[in-house]
Image: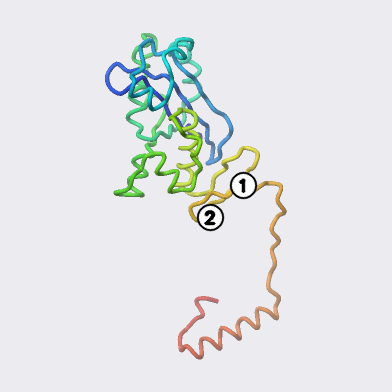
Amino acid sequence: MRQIVLDTETTGIGKGHRIIEIGAVEVIDRRLTGNTYHQYINPEREVDEEAFQVHGISDEFLSTQPVFSQIVKEFIEFINGSQLVIHNAPFDVGFMDFEFSLLSKLKKKTKDMCTVLDTLVLAKEMRPGQKNNLDALCRSFGIDNSNRDLHGALLDAELLAEVYLAMTGGQVSLTFEEGNDKQQGDKIIRLSDKRDKSKIVKATEQELSEHQKFMALIEKKSGKDLSVLW
């Protein structure tokens, strides 16, 4: 399965606001591939002060970036045919569909190109009554988000990928050079491919015989049938 974990930043909330940043990371068969998409976008309007306080992306910086119509082809090529994994998906998908609607030659919506999985819905089902924003989920699953002073689409997509994989199975490749990881408690432990392979040590016939005698003794003294444990 090819999944794209995606996040956006915008000029604000509500009608008429625009996307200013897209960040996305590729996951194939529950493995981060290292393939990412990241783009700042000139929204052709000002950023609301409240939004600026969240992401710190200025009008001056955005004025030097391409407009959405200039990046849409590459963006669609990256997400097309995938399952999008998004936290609070209606927000991001709504903004994406609005951007698509402004392009006269593009008669598509997100649902025409991708399926969507909302990790906020998933988190609420797993953790009813608890805070389920990205910071809370990072804390819950032991994922380091200490670099997240401000929101950023690519950083948030990377963190969400780790959260999603931890929520849905625990086995996840968080570093592209190291292919084997596991979850221990609520901490994700990275294991190097270069480590020595574990040796399989089987019990000898004598050890098996002694074990059976010991179990028979316990069974006799307890008065219970322990054969199901053998």
* Secondary structure under the numbered disc 1 in the rendered image: strand
Q: Position of residue 45 (x, y in %)?
A: 36, 11
Disc 1 marks a residue whose amino acid type is: Asn
Q: Position of residue 155 (x, y in %)?
A: 49, 31
Horizontal relation, residue 13 to residue 32: left or right: left
Numbered mark located on residue 184 in the image = 2
Q: Residue at x 70, y 67 (%)?
A: 201
Numbered mark located on residue 195 in the image = none
* Secondary structure under the numbered disc 2 in the rendered image: strand
Q: Residues within 10 Å of mark 2 (few under 14, many from 20)?
A: few
Q: Which quadrant, please, contains the C terminus?
A: bottom right
Residue farthest to the bottom, as pictured:
221
- Seen from the viewer's position, the closer of residues 37 and 185 is 185
Q: Which residue is mark 1?
A: 180
Horizontal relation, residue 198 to residue 147: left or right: right
Q: Position of residue 63 (x, y in %)?
A: 45, 10
Disc 2 marks a residue whose amino acid type is: Gln
**Looking at the image, is 84 positioned above or below residue 205?**
above
Q: How many numbered tags mark residues here? A: 2
Q: Residue at x 58, y 34 (%)?
A: 33
Horizontal relation, residue 202 to residue 154: left or right: right
**Looking at the image, is 168 positioned above or below residue 149?**
below
